[in-house]
Image: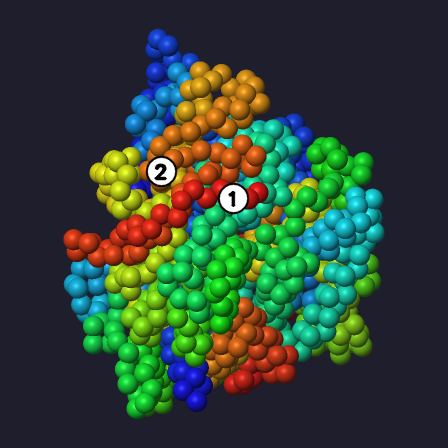
């Protein structure tokens, strides 16, 4: 897995730069979504928890940056991004706390509920501040990164950094404990590890990374919209992570690339692109199962 | 006084539809541990099929009777497909697969029926306000409450008194044990799935005069269905019933007193239930 | 309806073959980027607008300024992010000469900055948010449809004078709904009216029993409602089921009882008043021709969205004709568009040069059963309405 990954990354990096303005835009979107999808996969990898509410951090990070930059100015970017990441960490910590007793589908629905409440509050509750369901337009680019290719390269560097950190984390003692946590929570607890704190930490990190993805997205796109907080965004992130395999380092990147490329490509050719997307998802699930059956490991 | 009666009746009528939608979803999860995310699609499909049957026959009752059967035909096909992802430890693949299936059903529905808003009028006998003593209330939602009650009783009787019901409860309670005792779980699952599909489709036809048939209905109902089963506890008909009643009434109260935030109220309700009773109101038997 | 894509793929093919054969006088095709929803909740609007465009292009033999016209369609979906993505694709990859479309106001706002900064001409054929031709206007953006203010403001005074001064309001809780209510109240209150109850419902509601229960309690003289799509259909049907249809008169902005909604709810919509910049039974010769031609070609009654598409195509063709097909100067194109003026199905069509918003008549209509067919007939003409900008 880790053998072809650097090559994939190189191809991913070069292609948009050579492909023209539109390809560059798609590439930038892929980077933003990769960060958030990786966050989701990370959460699963370390705790076994599946979240259907990551749009709260992805969209929330976008809104945080948008509000700060809009009101203070483009110079506020470093501060805004840092704030978004910290807020993402804090709220995700809170969610993790709520989810301590929860698992499986119940955690899934809890995350959905929380993100949907946030969505409704942003869209209808505080529409004076958040721009309601028209969102907030006119967000400038960060100073020094106004050029699309510069912004994209910065994103790639960020993504690379995140993935390297992820890999180092997994190899570290803490990372190994997290792996154990996912495989068997009971045993890990019995072995003396503070399962609660580990889960909370993983939760917080996951939210922080998703918020970073949202911050990166809004910088490129120039506006923020409640749709970034909707359950369709959460669902898309989850699908990306799952299609990418959930466990590998590259899960988020692969999933994001596939889904965005598919969506962009298909919808230009047919109005029934949801159908083909659906067939793709069904096939992906089927092939995942077949490969799993071949490498079944007892827990 | 009349005002609060209306709020109650509105909630109960909505609960009836939610129950039909959620009962199948809950049972399928209980028996097969499959979260059937395409369930909302069958609700919508039932509605659309009801529409076509009504256009063809001109009779609502006929449409009501036949639509679930037509939906069953589709269900037979999808059941064979969903069988691929049956089994424990496959939650992620199930989500992916049934979600993909939901998209397929969604687009195929739009392909066959188009994107415009379609409607079915209530049958003439029910298409009028009805006098309940001094109070006047539309007849159709009262009919929905009646149907909901009948179906709930029917399902209860099915679970309690028939062999199939026994098998379902056994498989939902402890699948391995049930198999060891000779319960044909794959068959039971298949029948449960089809029952769920038929119920959802029935709900869809009944909902058609009350809602509007348009793209997006399937996912709206799916979310509501998930909320209902999670609140009530996955795996049981009673859970689906309690969940539907709770959500229906909360929805009615929400829409009446906090109209813009009605949906937020429901999500908050679900979040609270999950925080204090993580397995749902009736859950936690595993 | 679903063969339209095939049909103009055939047209494009014909154009391509014509070019390849070097047909005398044929020049490079005029490529128009069309961004409309072709999937999801608003798919029908996208289809209607497209059909309207195709009808007009057919009438001019698909020629503009001596050049064959080619429509390049992209799906707007319901995600403003995707709308922006598609617009950038049309401009940067497909190299279209101009852009048109956009049903959703949020999507229009999302692409506004990009369109303005890249100096591409966009002709909005639906999105009605006020700000697009007010605070966020751009010399490169034109709108052939309406603003929420334009459609709702005139109704307020009419309602106060003709129906009642005690009104309850029900509206979908999103920007367009709120803008419509605000505009309505502006003139309604100024004419001495009183709003006794205001209820906002979430977009995509599946049940209006609660709102209707509240209405029964408020006992207004009439109801002003704004809802769209499936919300409108459910609301109207339940309005009738609660017995309100025959007891409390209903006035809405036209979208709530447009032809597509009438098709869905039938009788339940009868008697409802509404304000809009067009009506299918508007007795103008251009309109009667349009409605007939549309029915013949597409087998259904046109809606206001189809009419907007029709006029949009006309605007583009007339501007390109004025330039004789030469679109090398964006500023000249803007000038040509500003000068477009014609009598169309809605009456006199012209742009406000300050805001690039269409100036048009607003009509009060009522859903009436004439000759065993339910449709909107005009009961009052409220005159020319120009959005203040």
Measuring from the top left, give residue C182's x and y in whole percent. 54, 58
Residue at 25 percent across and 73 percent down: it is B127
Measuring from the top left, give residue C199's x and y in whole percent. 50, 69
Q: Chain of mark 2?
A: C
Measuring from the top left, give residue A231's x and y in whole percent. 56, 60
Is C167 situated above or below A128?
Answer: below
Mark 1 Cα shell of 10 Å, populated few (<14), some (14-19), many (≥20): many
Residue C387: mark: 1
Residue A133: mark: none
Horizontal relation, residue B70 to residue A8: left or right: left
Name the foreground residue: A51 vs A296.
Answer: A51
Horizontal relation, residue A202 to residue B16: left or right: right
Q: Quadrant of the N terminus of chain C?
A: top left
Q: Secondary structure at mark 2?
A: strand
Residue at 34 percent across and 28 percent down: it is C57
Q: CA distance from mark 1 to mark 2?
A: 17 Å
Residue at 39 percent across and 70 percent down: it is C221
Q: Chain of mark 1?
A: C
Q: Secondary structure at mark 1?
A: loop
Quadrant housing residue C216: bottom left
Both on one chain, marks 1 and 2? yes
Is A12 situated above or below B194?
Answer: above
Residue at 44 percent across and 33 percent down: it is C350
Horizontal relation, residue B265 to residue A270: left or right: right
- Whether residue B31 is visible here, answered yes or no, is no
Horizontal relation, residue C224 to residue C7: left or right: right
Residue C347: mark: 2
Name the foreground residue: A92 vs A248.
Answer: A92
Are discs 1 and 2 less than 8 Å apart at CB? Answer: no
Mark 2 Cα shell of 10 Å, populated few (<14), some (14-19), many (≥20): many
Measuring from the top left, give residue B124's x and y in whole percent. 20, 72
Q: Quadrant of the C terminus of chain C?
A: top right
């Amino acid at each position: 897995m880790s053998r072809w990954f650097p090559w994939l990354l190189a191809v991913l990096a070069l292609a948009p730069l050579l492909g023209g303005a539109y390809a560059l835009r798609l590439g930038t979107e892929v980077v933003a979504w990769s960060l958030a999808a990786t966050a989701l996969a990370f959460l699963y990898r370390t705790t076994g928890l599946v979240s259907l509410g990551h749009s709260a951090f992805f969209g929330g990070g976008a809104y945080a940056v948008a509000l700060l930059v809009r009101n203070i100015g483009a110079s506020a970017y470093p501060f805004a991004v840092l704030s978004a990441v910290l807020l993402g960490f804090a709220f995700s910590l809170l969610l993790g706390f709520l989810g301590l007793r929860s698992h499986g589908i119940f955690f899934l629905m809890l995350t959905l509920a929380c993100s949907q409440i946030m969505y409704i509050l942003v869209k209808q509750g505080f529409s004076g501040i958040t721009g309601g369901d028209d969102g907030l337009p006119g967000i400038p680019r960060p100073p020094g990164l106004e050029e699309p290719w510069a912004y994209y390269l910065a994103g790639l560097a960020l993504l690379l950094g995140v993935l390297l950190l992820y890999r180092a984390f997994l190899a570290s003692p803490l990372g190994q404990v997290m792996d154990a946590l996912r495989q068997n929570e009971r045993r890990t607890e019995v072995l003396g590890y503070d399962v609660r704190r580990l889960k909370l930490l993983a939760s917080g990190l996951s939210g922080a990374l998703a918020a970073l993805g949202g911050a990166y997205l809004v910088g490129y796109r120039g506006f923020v919209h409640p749709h970034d907080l909707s359950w369709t965004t959460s669902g898309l992130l989850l699908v990306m992570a799952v299609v990418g395999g959930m466990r590998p380092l590259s899960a988020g990147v692969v999933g994001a690339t596939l889904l965005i490329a598919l969506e962009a490509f298909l919808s230009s050719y047919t109005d029934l692109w949801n159908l083909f997307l659906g067939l793709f998802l069904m096939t992906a699930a089927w092939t995942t199962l077949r490969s799993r059956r071949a490498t079944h490991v007892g827990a | 006084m009349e005002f609060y009666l209306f709020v109650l009746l509105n909630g109960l009528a909505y609960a009836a539809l939610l129950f039909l939608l959620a009962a199948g979803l809950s049972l399928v999860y209980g028996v097969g541990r499959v979260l059937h995310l395409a369930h909302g699609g069958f609700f919508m499909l039932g509605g659309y099929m009801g529409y076509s049957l009504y256009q063809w026959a001109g009779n609502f009752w006929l449409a009501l009777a036949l639509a679930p059967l037509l939906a069953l035909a589709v269900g037979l096909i999808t059941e064979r497909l969903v069988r691929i992802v049956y089994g424990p430890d496959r939650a992620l693949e199930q989500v992916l697969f049934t979600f993909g299936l939901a998209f397929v059903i969604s687009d195929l529905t739009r392909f066959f029926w188009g994107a415009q808003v379609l409607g079915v009028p209530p049958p003439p006998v029910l298409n009028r306000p009805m006098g309940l003593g001094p109070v006047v209330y539309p007849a159709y939602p009262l009919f929905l409450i009646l149907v909901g009650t009948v179906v709930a009783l029917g399902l209860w009787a099915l679970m309690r008194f028939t062999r199939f019901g026994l098998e379902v409860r056994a498989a939902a309670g402890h699948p391995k044990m049930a198999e060891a005792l000779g319960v044909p779980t794959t068959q039971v699952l298949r029948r449960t799935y089809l029952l769920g599909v038929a119920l959802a489709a029935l709900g869809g036809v009944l909902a058609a005069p009350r809602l509007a048939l348009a793209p997006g209905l399937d996912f709206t109902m799916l979310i509501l269905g998930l909320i209902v089963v999670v609140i009530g506890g996955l795996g049981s008909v009673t859970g689906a019933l309690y969940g539907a009643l709770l959500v229906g009434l909360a929805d009615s109260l929400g829409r009446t007193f906090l109209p813009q935030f009605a949906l937020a109220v429901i999500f908050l309700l679900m979040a609270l239930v999950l925080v204090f009773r993580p397995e749902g109101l009736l859950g936690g038997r595993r | 309806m679903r063969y339209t894509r095939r049909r103009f793929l055939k047209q494009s093919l014909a154009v391509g073959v014509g070019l390849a054969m070097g047909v005398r006088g044929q020049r490079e095709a005029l490529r128009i980027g069309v961004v409309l929803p072709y999937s999801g909740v608003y798919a029908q609007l996208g289809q209607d607008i497209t059909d309207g465009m195709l009808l007009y292009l057919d009438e001019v033999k698909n020629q503009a300024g001596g050049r064959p016209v080619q429509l390049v369609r992209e799906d707007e979906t319901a995600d403003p992010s995707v709308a922006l993505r598609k617009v950038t694709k049309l401009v940067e990859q497909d190299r279209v000469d101009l852009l048109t479309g956009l049903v959703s106001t949020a999507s229009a706002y999302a692409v506004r900055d990009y369109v303005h900064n890249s100096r591409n001409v966009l002709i909005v054929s639906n999105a009605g948010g006020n700000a697009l031709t007010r605070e966020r206007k751009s010399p490169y953006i034109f709108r052939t449809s309406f603003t929420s203010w334009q459609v709702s403001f005139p109704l307020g005074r009419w309602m106060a004078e003709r129906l009642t001064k005690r009104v309850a309001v029900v509206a979908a809780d999103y920007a367009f709904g709120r803008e419509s209510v605000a505009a309505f109240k502006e003139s309604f209150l100024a004419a001495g009216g009183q709003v006794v109850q205001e209820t906002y419902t979430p977009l995509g509601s599946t049940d209006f029993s609660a709102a209707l229960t509240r209405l029964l309690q408020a006992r207004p003289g009439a109801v002003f409602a704004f809802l769209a799509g499936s919300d409108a259909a459910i609301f109207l049907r339940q309005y009738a089921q609660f017995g309100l249809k025959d007891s409390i008169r209903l006035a809405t902005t036209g979208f709530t009882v447009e032809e597509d909604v009438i098709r869905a709810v039938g009788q339940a919509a009868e008697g409802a008043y509404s304000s809009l910049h067009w009506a299918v039974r508007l007795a103008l010769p251009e309109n009667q021709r349009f409605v007939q031609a549309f029915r013949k070609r597409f087998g259904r009654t046109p809606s206001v969205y189809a009419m907007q598409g029709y006029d949009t195509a006309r605007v583009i063709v007339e501007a390109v004709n004025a330039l004789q097909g030469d679109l090398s100067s964006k500023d000249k194109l803007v000038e040509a568009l500003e000068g477009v003026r014609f009598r169309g199905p809605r009456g006199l069509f012209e742009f406000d040069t300050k805001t690039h918003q269409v100036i048009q008549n607003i009509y009060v209509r009522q859903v009436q059963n004439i000759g065993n067919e339910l449709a909107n007939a005009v009961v009052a003409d409220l005159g020319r309405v120009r959005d203040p900008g």
